[in-house]
Image (cartoon, grey):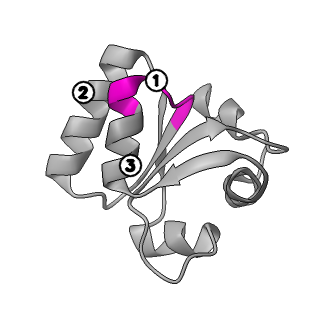
Amino acid sequence: MIDINKQIRMAVKTGKVDLGANQTLEAARLGRAKLIVLASNCPQAERTEIEYNSKLSQIPIFVYAGSSLDLGTVCERPHVVSAIAVKEQGDSEVLKLAVS
């Protein structure tokens, strides 16, 4: 079993990720993400739009069990993060979350 927090943190440090709902939505629209991670309390309007564009671009979505504050802490950011678009996983195995 993989440690979700550790893999997300590793992806942020060693890979290429976009943080925030607006950047994640743009990555989903353009099909540039390999995985999208949504916080459990991501605002419904943003979540719906991200899910729709992800489906069109065939990008898997993983719903993080914690809040946007928890996701921000995992990403080592001093603010809330409601969504992450993983463009390159780096040294992490975060793309395995898409299968889970």
Mark 3 or mark 1: which comes first in sequence? Answer: 3
Q: Nearer the viewer, residue 3 or 21?
A: 21
In front: mark 3 or mark 1? 3
**Dot 3 and dot 2 residues touching (CB under 8 Å):** no
Element assignment for label 3: helix
Check the image and report above or below for 100 versus 7.
above
Q: Amino acid at mark 3?
A: Gln
Q: How many neighbours does mark 2 have within 10 angstroms: few (below 14), some (14-19), or many (20 or more)? A: some
Residue 63 lies in what quarter of the image? top left
Q: For mark 2, what is the residue?
A: 52
Q: Which residue is mark 1?
A: 59
| Amino acid on which disc 1 is placed | Ile
Q: Is residue 85 left or right of residue 99?
A: left
Viewport quadrant of the N terminus: top right
Name the kind of residue labelled 2 in the image. Tyr
- Mark drawn on residue 23: 3
Q: For the C terminus, give its image quadrant.
A: top right
